Amino acid sequence: MEFDFKEKASSSSDDEEVVIHPRAASSKKPISGGGSAGGATLGPGPGVCQTSNMHELLECPVCTHSMFPPIHQCQNGHTLCSSCKARVHNRCPTCRQELGDIRCLALEKVAESLDMPCKYASLGCPEIFPYFSKPKHEIQCGYRPFCCPYAGSDCSVTGNIPKLVAHLRDDHRVDMHTGSTFNHRYVKSNPRDVENATWMLTVFNCFGEYFCLHFEAFLLGQAPVYMAFIRFMGDENEAKTYSYSLEVGASGRRMIWEGTPRSIRDSHRKVRDSHDGLIIQRNMALFFSGGDRKELKLRVTGRIWKEHQSQESGACIPNLFN
């Protein structure tokens, strides 16, 4: 099947506001004893606090993330993380007293003794780690949510792959197709306007997985170019088991790109700026468009296939059947 794609518009927003999380502000009690571990008390006595209660004590009232050393506190015992200390201009977000440089060594010592589940436990991660080892795991946890792969907007939606597929279909209204081969034609009435022009994302369902086909125009240095590439909706180790090809051509000439799809863990901009895809200079794109070369009508064909690894040699053998 052949599809025509017109250029789409994009928008963004960067507003940020520092607020105190209502639940954190109301549920957390001051920690007495100043900054020394010997004089501080946490609750009524040793062993009384449950893990969930300790997790609340270790939650920053501003960003609601877990706190790690240095943990700061005001003279009244209210705590917050070091990142938010600068954001609140050295004023306690709970009582508005000046924070100073008081460390809550007691809370840091208690945190050091805790074993905590991964913050993605609700998404299926079964791992438990010492409190201070959690961040290193969570950065690379296979259960962490994916970011929306839609290009041209600052979409903040995250989730697992089924959720993102439904989000792309229902909210961004992207083109959804089934199959591992495609034949698209991208149209632009003013091909000289190439700066950050982006076409509608296309999502393919094949081999039981989802892939995103991107096509856009931008300036590579001073040269206007068009670029097409595919991203895999899953982790990098799974992405490496697939390959894809993209082809443009006309009048007996053609350009072909073959590569491995990048995971959507890598942002659209990161992939584009690494030039990991089919790049076509504007003059060549207009040549492939035919006619008087005043309008872009670029046909891009391609296919996706899964690499099967040979058990004897370890070599990858392409599987061309969906």
Image: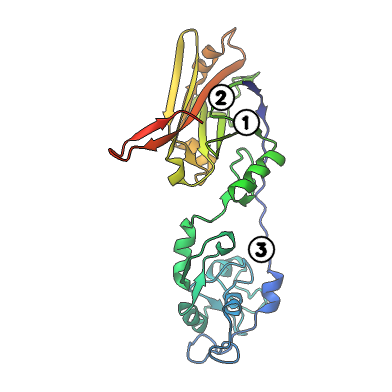
Q: How is the image coloured?
A: rainbow
Give the image location of residue 319, x and y in percent: 43, 31
Secondary structure beneath dot 1 equals: strand
Q: Marks 1 and 3, how far apart in space?
A: 42 Å
**Crowd around label 2: few <14 · some 14–19 · many ≥20 (10 Å):** some
Amino acid beneath label 2: Phe
Amino acid beneath label 1: His
Q: Which residue is mark 3?
A: 18
Q: Front-most of 285 and 110? A: 110
Question: Could you tell me how many numbered marks the image carries?
Answer: 3
Q: Residue at x 28, y 38 (%)?
A: 313
**For residue 136, above or below residue 101:** above
Secondary structure beneath dot 2 equals: strand
**For residue 262, above or below residue 46:** above
Q: Which residue is mark 1?
A: 177
Q: Is residue 114 visible?
A: yes
**For residue 10, above or below residue 164:** above
Q: Residue furthest front?
A: 312
Amino acid beneath label 3: Val
Secondary structure beneath dot 3 equals: loop
Q: Marks 2 and 1, how far apart in space?
A: 9 Å
